[in-house]
Amino acid sequence: MDAIMADPELVSFVRKHIAQLGEDGVREQMLREGAEPEEVEEAIAAAGAPEARSGASMAILAVVGGGMLLAAAAMLSNQPPQLDRPPGKPGDEAESPQSYMSETDSVFHGHAGYMLRLPPGYEAQSSFQDAEKTQETVYIYKKGTDPSHFIHEGLYGALGIFRLEVMPRRIPQGFVGVDTLRGWVTRKLDQEKATYAVRSLIVQGMPSFIVVATKPFQYAQAYCVGERVRYMLIGGDDGELFTAILSSLAEVAPHGRQPQ
């Protein structure tokens, strides 16, 4: 197909996410967002031009934020608005987790316009805490796991369960920024006399931080601040699966449709 006729926005979307989701994944997402099949195929063909493939080949040398350098370059040009984030402190440098998933993993599409990859053998179950569907809870678990275990965070590590909570950034006091969120979390942990460590990172362009606690029990919590919503991923530890799921979390909204 003629690359000149392809929608530039769709081409950009394909180039940003194809390394992470694969061709079928980006095709499915664009169709879900309302793109016409012909537009989708034109965009994929245009994104697969020699120039794009050459860039993707070079990008295999490093993984950044769960994607390759090609995806990272796209994210740097599409950073969310500057939040209440002061200059970093020594030992608090931003970092990005590495993805351990394969191209055959399933993709979960969240209500607020985000997606993440599920590890092999895993499935996801989503529910909402309010009638307006602004607060979503997603359980990520091995197939066959008893759902009664979902409420016991102390079992997450042993059973390989993860929970993602998605909430609006807007609260009565304004928009929640990453440093405000970090302050809330650490104050609560201090009140609980927890033993924990915190580190900052960037997840798919979103300012984020991870809390790893050892007392009163071991768990990991990652907090990401997106454009309109904030995310909290909870797991038994910050091992490979936790890192892979976190690094795959991405906000996608082609055609200018914003998450609700």
Image: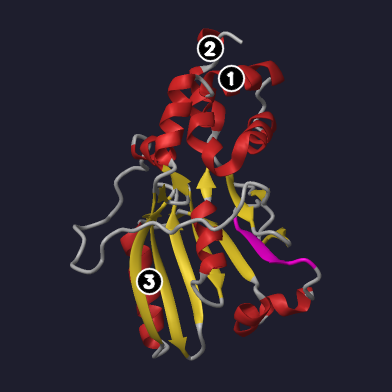
Give how far across and how far down residue 243 sits, in percent.
50, 63
Q: Residue at x 65, y 61 (%)?
A: 138
Q: Which quadrant would the N terminus be assigned to in this image?
A: top right
The magenta stretch spans residue 142 = yes
Q: Circle 3 — which element? A: helix
What residue is drawn where x is 39% and y is 41%? 69
User: Badge 1 is on which residue?
Assistant: 45
Q: Residue 238: horizontal and vertical position, in percent?
A: 49, 72
Q: Is residue 49 magenta?
A: no
For marks 3 and 2 on the same chain, the one whose residue lies earlier in the sequence: 2
Residue type marked 2? Ala
Pointer 2: residues within 10 angstroms few (<14), some, or many (20+)?
Answer: some
Q: Which mark is residue 3?
A: 2
Q: For this view, does 158 lie left or right of residue 9? A: right
Task: Say whether residue 260 is visible.
Answer: no
Q: Main secondary structure of the magenta part?
A: strand
Colour convention: secondary structure
Residue type at mark 1 is Ala
Q: For the residues carrying marks 1 and 3, which lies nearer the camera in this image?
A: 1
How far apart marks 3 and 2 lie (CA) works out to 49 Å
Residue named by callout 3? 184
Quadrant (top left/top right/bottom left/bottom right) for the C terminus: top right
Q: Amino acid at mark 3?
A: Trp
In this picture, which residue range is highlighted in magenta?
A: 135-143
**Mark nearer the N terminus (1 vs 3):** 1
- Mark 2 vs 1: CB contact within 8 A: yes
Mark 2 or mark 1: which comes first in sequence? 2
- Viewer-nearest of discs 3 and 2: 2
Task: Give how far across and how far down residue 116 sits, in percent.
Answer: 59, 51
Q: Is residue 126 above or below residue 156?
A: above
Q: Would you identify the image quadrant in which residue 5 lies? A: top right
